[in-house]
Amino acid sequence: MYFRYGHIPAGEKEKKMRILCIVSVLVVNMFVNSSAAMDDPQRQIEFALVIHGGAGNITRNSISPELDAVYRKALTDALEAGYQILEKGGSSLDAIETVIRIMEDDSLFNAGRGAVFTAEGTNELDAAIMDGQTINAGAVAGVKRIKNPITLARLVMENSRHVMMAREGAESFGEQFGIETVPEEYFYTERRWQTLQRVREREAEPDNLGTVGAVALDKAGNLAAGTSTGGRTNKRFGRIGDVPVIGAGTYANNVTCAVSATGYGEYIIRSVVAYDISALMEYKGMSLHEAANHVIMQKMPELGGYGGIIAIDKQGTITMPFNTTGMYRGYVLDDGEFVVKLYGDE
Amino acid sequence: MNSKVKGDVMDESGIRRLSLQKAAERVVMEKLPEPGGYGGIIVIDRFGNIAMQFMTAGMHRGYVLDDAALPVVIKNQK
């Protein structure tokens, strides 16, 4: 298998533990996955897709074997749908939109149907998409009635002169193009409602920072990135996270890479995470792997933030670093082998 | 927004050690117009160097330094 994780020698697996002094004191896995060998560093991967379903306190103790299997199946199903598109020569934009729609429709993930609740007991969704070929981008923030915010983000990108639209205005814009709307109750799920009650009682920080995202390289050599989320449980005052902020949670540029982030949104915005990875490659000549590790394992924890990213470059090199205990994640390359992982030790 | 103007200047001056002025020029005069954008920026670094770069016909701009001179104000011209 020709899977490459940057320039790490085959077989070397590095894992360090570190405690971060942050509100919820997460155990951090300094984790460099290099289990797959670089058989041929020069081989151009024809197409590839990487997805995430959120980072956070995801451990074998916190997830039952049954739920573990359900998550793995959901991630694999999403990857398969994207693989079908890319394999037939479809665009990276089509692939990531399709994959994110599937995850938005699945109540497992904090996006679309499974979005978390705000402090007022509502659901307010954010999403963004970016085309690495044209450097076009579209984003929506705080929408409440859109079934698939990622599709609305794409409408903003392709059918307006703007990049970001919010709330009722964004919804009205989507309705002009016939986007599917749903009553607000559609986003009510018992699991998320109980999470809100728990977080309210403890006034605690939520553990799981769900969000879904996808990045892809297509046969034409174009990169794209997309991210969608319900935000943070118990969020207030019209809080908007990193997801719709281009350069923070989402970025794509054919010159460098495509990135989708998940984690503590405020820190991802302040670190301009996705663009910083791209800039380190462009200006400092770092590899994708070096740049992503530097930002997620060094710069972000130094600021006090936590989370993870998925990224891909033009050669089809992929990386999925995170500084939390786990991240729902997976990838498929042109060889059609689906790989799905949840925890830091796999 | 797409070109991340502010971030670019910071990255370029910090990493490649371009002068603030060179970094501002490269971003505003070369990268920003590439996808069709236009505009200007004001920027200052931690040494107090300043740059006011724009690629439009003009920009209302001004600055004051610690030299006790009066503020410099330029109204919408090159």
Image (cartoon, coloured by chain):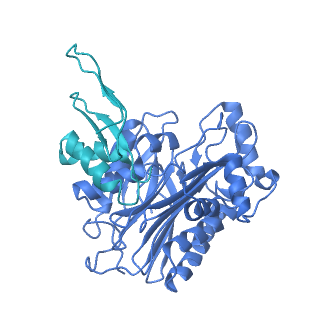
Chain colours: A blue, B cyan
Which of the 4 image quadrants contains residue A298? Answer: top left
In the picture shown, does residue A184 fall above or below A226? above
- In the rendered picture of this protein, how many numbered marks are placed on residues? 0
**Which residue is located at x 68 percent, y 61 percent?**
A148
* Residue occupying the far top of the picture: B68
Where in the figure is residue A130, as x and y percent of width and height?
49, 61
Indicate left or right for A124 with B41 as reference. right
Which of the 4 image quadrants contains residue B44? Answer: top left
* Residue occupying the far bottom of the picture: A88
Where in the figure is residue A31, as x and y percent of width and height?
37, 55
**Which residue is located at x 24 percent, y 29 percent?**
B46
Say which of A275 and A103 sits in front: A275
Say which of A146 and A165 sits in front: A165
Residue A60 appears anywhere in the view: no
Where in the figure is residue B22, as x and y percent of width and height?
20, 45
Residue A263 appears anywhere in the view: yes
Say which of A176 and A49 sits in front: A176
Indicate left or right for A282 with A240 as reference. left
Q: Quadrant of the N terminus of chain A?
A: bottom left
In the picture shown, does residue A230 fall above or below A77? above
Where in the figure is residue A80, as x and y percent of width and height?
57, 78
Say which of A51 and A194 sits in front: A51
Q: Quadrant of the C terminus of chain A?
A: bottom left
